[in-house]
Image (cartoon, rainbow, N blue to C red):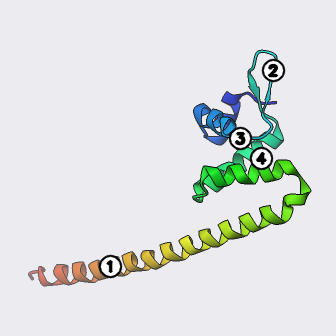
Amino acid sequence: MLTISEVTELTGITAPTLRYYEKEGLLPYVKRNENGKRFYDEEDLSWVHFVTALRATGMPIAQIQRYVNLYKEGDSTISERKKMMLLHKKEIENSIRELYFNLDKINYKLALYDVLESQIEKTSLKI
């Protein structure tokens, strides 16, 4: 079992963020001792990594909450959870495609600057 400070050290996620995720129901099974101190096991760490990945890829908190609630309902919701992940995957793939399209524009502009700089350097040389 890990303390909240150990989890922050392992994951890089701040303690307030972990508390917020728990409060919002995104970390469904965080345990507490008799003093109310949080303890995290491997399953909790898996949830932390999963929620972090979903947030980093733009999934709103409300959607993650929906996913967690479906998870808690059990195996009868596997199909719906899979649909959620497939939809999110498609959104990520669209974002990646758009990023590459825009990266190509930036790379073109950088190549143009390389050509322009090399021409300036050649014309400013005086022998």
Residue at (29% x, 79% y) in the render: 114
User: Mark 3 or mark 1, which is nearer to you?
Assistant: 3
What residue type is disc 1 on?
A: Lys
What residue type is disc 2 on?
A: Asn
Q: Is residue 113 above or below residue 30?
A: below
Residue 51 spot, x, y in % from top left: 68, 49
The residue carrying mark 2 is: 33
The residue carrying mark 4 is: 46
User: Mark 2 or mark 1, which is nearer to you?
Assistant: 2
Q: Residues within 10 Å of mark 3 (few under 14, many from 20)?
A: some
The residue carrying mark 1 is: 109
Q: How far apart are marks 2 and 1 (CA)?
A: 58 Å
The numbered dot on residue 25 is 3
Mark sitting earlier along the chain (3/4):
3
Q: Distance between the residues labelled 4 and 2?
A: 20 Å
Q: Distance between the residues labelled 3 and 4?
A: 15 Å
Image quarter (top left, top right, bottom left or bottom right) of the C terminus: bottom left
The numbered dot on residue 96 is none
Image quarter (top left, top right, bottom left or bottom right) of the N terminus: top right
What residue type is disc 3 on?
A: Gly
